[in-house]
Image (cartoon, rainbow, N blue to C red):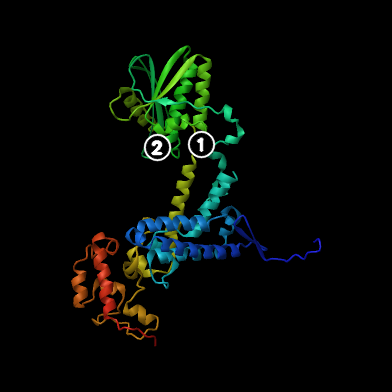
Amino acid sequence: MDGESLNVANSIRYLGVEWDSHLSFTPHINLTKERVGKLLNEVATAGKSMFHKYPGLLKEIYTGAIERVALYGVGAWGHRTKLKGFCDRLRQVQRICGLVLSRSYRTVSTDATQILAGIVPLDIVARAEWCKFQICGLKLPATDLIGNEVDPANFDFPTDLHMSHPVDRRSLGFGSRLPCGDGLEIFTDGSAINGAVGGAFVVCYYGQAIHRGLGRLEDRNSVFQAELTAIEKACSWVTQNLRNTEVSLFSDSRSGLQTIANPDNRCSIAISILEHVEKARTQNVKIHLNWVKAHVGITGNELADSAAKEATELELQDWAQKLPKSYLRRSLKTMAQDLWQNRWNETTNGLVTKKFFPKVSTSRLIRGRVAQLATGHGRFPSYLHRFNFDIEGECWCGLGMGSSDHYLTNCTLLDIVKLRRKLKAVNDPLNILTHKANQPVLNQIVLTISKLLPNPLTRD
C-alpha cells in the first residue's frame, strides 16, 4: 500500500483487548495471565509486611485487582464463557491468585485453592458479568447463570442525563425541622418484613391523622424504592386533593431525600416526585421536604411506620415499580454461590479439603501451615513419599500413613499428643481448622512434624 508492505498478524491489541484472527480470545487470556502474575508480584512486594499482619486486606486487594484485570473487556469475549475450554483457561488465571492468597503448595488443585482463599471461580464471575453487560449495557434479553431468560424491560435503569439540558434538571432540597402539629403534615415510610416490601403515608391535620395510603410492592423491590414510592404517592395525593396551601412532608429516609435533592439524580421515582412537586406549584401548593429520625417518638412517623408494616401483609401488590439493578446483582451473586457449591460437591479434587470445608464461603481465608493441614499437601511423610522423596510414607508412631488427618486425630507421638490436647473442637472437623484459638497450635503441629523429617530431603 503506497509502496509499503503490510505484514499479516495473527492478533492485534485494540482498546486493551487482544483480538485474534479466529476470535477465540485465547491470546487475550494468555496475556491476562501474564498481567495477573506481574500484578501479584508488585502488590506483594509493595506491602509484604502489612499483608502478613492483615491477610484480609490482602485478599480484598488481590481479588478486586484480579477481577478488574481478568474481566476487562468481558463485553467482547463474554460469549466465549459458554465453552468449557475457555472457562478452564480463566480458572488457570485465577489459580495464581488462589495459590498466593492461601500460600499453599503448587500441587494443590485449583478447586481446593478457591475454597481455601474464599474466591468464587473466575469463569462463573465472568458469566455473571457477561449477563449484567447484556442486560444493563446493551438492554438485551439474556440468560442468567441457571438458564432463565431475563428481560431488561423489568428493571429500573438510571435515566440518561444527556437526554435533557442541564437547565431543565430539577431538584428539591430538604430541611431537618421537627413537626410542630400546625397545618397539614404528611409522614412517609417504607418497610420490608419476611421478604415482603411495603410503603405508606399518613396525612395529619393539626396533629390528627385524617388520611393514610398504603401499598405493597413486589417482594423483589428494595426498601429504598419503597421509601421513595411512599413519597411519590404522598405528592400525588397532594396534587389531586389540595389547592392554595403549604404542606410539610416528613421522611426518615435520608438517602431518599438526598436523591431528590441531587440535580443530577437518575432515579425514575425521584424524577416522578419532582414532576408532582412542579405540578403542585402550578396549583399554588408548596411542598416542603424534611428529614426526621426514625423511632424517636414522633407520633406521625410512628403511624407511618406502623402503616408501612401493615402494607407488607397486603395480598395485592398495588404499588408497582420496576426491579432495581441491585436485585439483579444479588440474584446473580446467589446463583454464582450455588453453582460454586454444586461444582465443589461434584469434583473429585481436594478430597482432604472437602472433609474440612464441605460448604463454600467467600469469607474464608486459610493460609500457610494451616493450609497444609487443610489440603494434605505439605511436609508430611505421606505427601513426600507420594512425590518420590526418599522417605517412608508411614508415620513414625507406626499407626498409619503420616497424613495431615492422621496427625489431627490418632497420632501417638508424644509431642503431637501434647499439642493436640490444646486444640478446641477436636471432634468437629468443620471447625477445628478455623477456630481462632487453634491457629498457633496448628502451626506448631506442622513445625513439629517438619523437625522430624530428614534434612535435606532427596528424591529416589
Write the residue at 43% across / 21% down: 288
Classify 204 as above or below 99. above
Instruction: Tell which of 9 and 116 is nearer to you.
Output: 9
Q: Nearer the viewer, mark 1 or mark 2?
A: 1
Residue at which label 1 appears = 322
Disc 2 packing (10 Å; few <14; some 14–19; many ≥20): many
For badge 2, the amino acid type reads Ala
Question: What SS does tag 1 mark?
Answer: loop
To which residue does mark 2 refer? 196
Q: Which amino acid does the dot numbered 1 rest on?
A: Lys
Residue 361 visible: no
> Is residue 153 left or right of 197 when viewed as pictured?
right
Residue lying furthest top in this view? 244
Numbered disc total: 2
Q: Is residue 7 above or below residue 272?
A: below
Instruction: Tell me the element at label 2.
Output: strand
| Image quadrant where one finds the C terminus | bottom left
354 horizontally vs 66: left or right: left
